[in-house]
Image (tube, grey):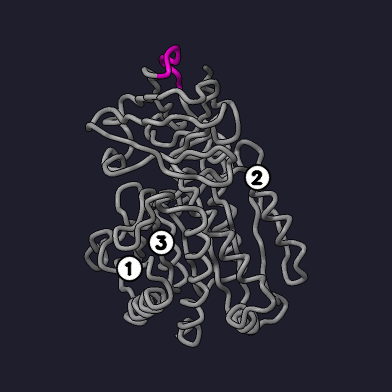
Amino acid sequence: MKISSNFDSGNIEVINADDPAHIRLRIPYDAGDEFMQWFHFRLNGAKDQDCTIIIEDLDKSAYPSGWEYYRACASYDRETWFRVDTDFDGEEMTIRHTPQLDTVWFAYFAPYTRERHHDLIAKCQLHPRVRHEVLGETLDGEDMDLLVVGDDYADDRLKLWAIARQHPGETMAEWWMEGFLTRLLDDHDPVSRELLQRAVFYVVPNMNPDGSRRGHLRTNAAGANLNREWAAPSLERSPEVYWVEKKMREIGLDFCLDVHGDEGLPYNFIAGADAIPDCPQRLIDLREAFEANLRRVSPDFQSEHGYPPKAAGEANLTYASTHIQNTFQALTMTLEMPFKDTVDTPDYFQGWSPERSQKLGASCLDAIWGILPDIKG
Ligand code: ZN
């Protein structure tokens, strides 16, 4: 039997893998030694044997509550990720599975590899309305990719931004991007066609390539949590944010969606930036209208459960959403998807999944379409 993680976004430390019934593992910390939660490994050579895999020390993980009612993801073909029997006792997580084939992959959530990212960029650039721009380099020397969708030579177009995966382990955010971009580039979709008559989309499908490849949950190569870097990004510590924020200032911005996953809460929800100093009421109304639209088109989305709202003026302006909304006085929201499943619309086999993330991405275009006339105020 062999357990390995020496591949794109792999992350596990083997303590003991001599006996399938008593496998013990640990999750290495992200660079910066502050966060650990993302795991991704494969197990070979235990076909038809009852495997008990214990992951230790999860009381020290970034979000211990993330393991409550959580079920690990597994796959034989790396396309379909299903959930397996998982328990958590407050300290250790136990995964029980009897592999039906020689090799089975396990992960915190369905991985979204760098290769798949390049496939996505390549597929999108074939569309005549797409431009692909490289904004700069990361610390590991990866490209920061921007897709410009629409007729950006026309001055009268709204400038709508979408960014994802500042936290690289939140892979559902890039799955969301696939659904969002695929529908936006569907020449037969009436909503996409009309949106592109009036708006240009500036899309960063992966804000944290280094963390993605390294198998981090939350940080880049320098150990920076990018969603706390927006007030003063630097080329030494957070070039990813530096390049994207610079481009936003160059181009302008009328709307921005920042896509994430939440470890603990079993819901899709929006975290608004209402608590910025002197937030205009029209931006609060616009956020509520966006959420109402999204609830109407997607039963997977809700607004009852989410983060507790902050008092007016109390916003932390190092976040993307608050920094951008405050800087551009334009609606900016964080969209959170679950690692577990949605309580109201569960899927026992897959839980929250790549496919459902893609559908939510596509639905967000309806919600944007609904508020388009009011985006600029
Ligand atoms: Zn996040």
Image coords of residue 334 (percent x, y): 41, 61
**Which residue occupies the foreground of this view, 288 or 102?**
102
**218 falls in the magenta region:** no
Callout 3: CB less than 8 Å from ligand 1: yes
Callout 2: CB less than 8 Å from ligand 1: no
Task: Give the crowd class for mark 2: few <14, some 14-19, many >=20 residues within 10 Å.
Answer: some
Looking at the rendered image, the quarter that the C terminus falls into is bottom left
Residue type (three-letter) at the residue carrying disc 2 = Glu
The residue singled out by tag 3 in the image is: 334
The residue singled out by tag 2 in the image is: 137
Contact (Cβ within 8 Å) of mark 2 with mark 1: no
Side (left or right) of 179 relative to 83: right
Task: Say whether disc 2 or disc 1 marks the residue closer to the N-terminus.
Answer: 2
Q: Secondary structure at mark 1?
A: loop
Residue type (three-letter) at the residue carrying disc 1 = Gln
Residue type (three-letter) at the residue carrying disc 3 = Thr
Image coords of residue 376 (percent x, y): 48, 83
Which residue is drawn at the image coordinates 56% and 46% (left, top)?
112
